[in-house]
Amino acid sequence: VTLQGLAARPELNGEVVVVLAPASAEETAQLEATGRAKVSHYPKALSLRLQSLELAPPPDWSRSLPFRISDIVRGAPSVLEVAQAAVVAGEDLGALGRIHELQGAEDLAEALWAFCGRGEVGPAKELPDDFAELVLDTPGHWLYWIGLEQVSHHVIVEACDCTWRIYQATAPRRPQPVAKADEKALATGKGFEEFGGVLLESGGAGRRRRGYRAGAWASWEASGAPSASSSGPPPPDVVELDKDKEVPEELPEKLLVA
């Protein structure tokens, strides 16, 4: 819903929030008695009168940029045409026309961050315990860069009007030999704590090489159905597999849709 007519906090008017379920029977009774509803807001939920709530329109994912980030990551024709025209005109749009081809997770995160005008990357902060609430309950259009250093992965979370999307890429990984110390630890069944609390990658010799470009991850929605902004047949780098059939050993740059 959209907030409107708030005299005490006019800066909240126009923001999009989500109506939350009461946490208890006591809270339910209190809200009903005062004609209010509990709505999302970071860092603390708000209790507002029903007349201050209006049905919100669909999220506007393009209000902060000339292109939707999902179209940039997907490599939509409209984005690629502008990128190519800029090259012909001698203008520099950075990696706009190449973002969808990136396979490195950190490369994708850095390219998106730079294109969206966030400037230089500042020092990383510890992931807060209430990160889910921070993303879902902060009104407006935001990007979050999450560096998962222990697994050498990075993701970009885009949040807009209480909805969110995640962008990522994964580069092919070559099989790595297992160190002698790791072999011994695996053979003896020692647990995670035996590595001093540091997550190590072991047993990589049997890992398949499979790289997923940013555009492949973003080509389809989670349901496997074409997104509202896409048209035509599925892109050629998307492969649908029967769950009952064996997965081929080598599927470079393919997206598996279960």
Image (cartoon, rainbow, N blue to C red):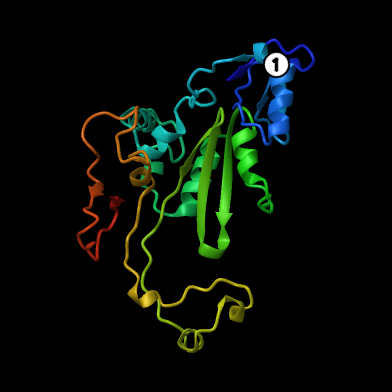
User: Quick check: 75 above or below 192?
Assistant: above
Spot occupied by residue 13 in the image (x, y as percentages of width and height): 68, 16
Q: Residues within 10 Å of mark 1 (few under 14, many from 20)?
A: few
Name the residue beneath numbered marker 1. Answer: 35
Q: In this view, does 191 lie to the left or right of 241?
A: right
Q: Report the number of discs.
A: 1
- Helix, strand or loop at label 1? It is loop
Figure check: 210 above or below 158? below
Q: Is there any visible trace of residue 118 in the rendered image?
A: no
Q: Is residue 41 above or below residue 255?
A: above
At 32% from the left edge and 60% from the top edge, which residue is drawn?
A: 210
Q: Residue flagged by tag 1: what amino acid is it?
A: Gly
Q: State the image coordinates of residue 141 (x, y, percent, origin top left).
A: 57, 29
Residue 32 drawn at (x, y percent): 69, 20
Query: What residue lies at 44% left-to-right and 27% top-to-bottom?
Result: 67
Q: Which of 163 and 44 is in front in this view?
A: 44
Nearest the eye: 242 or 109: 242
Horizontal side of residue 222 vs 147, given as left or right:
left
> Is residue 203 visible in the rendered structure shown here?
yes
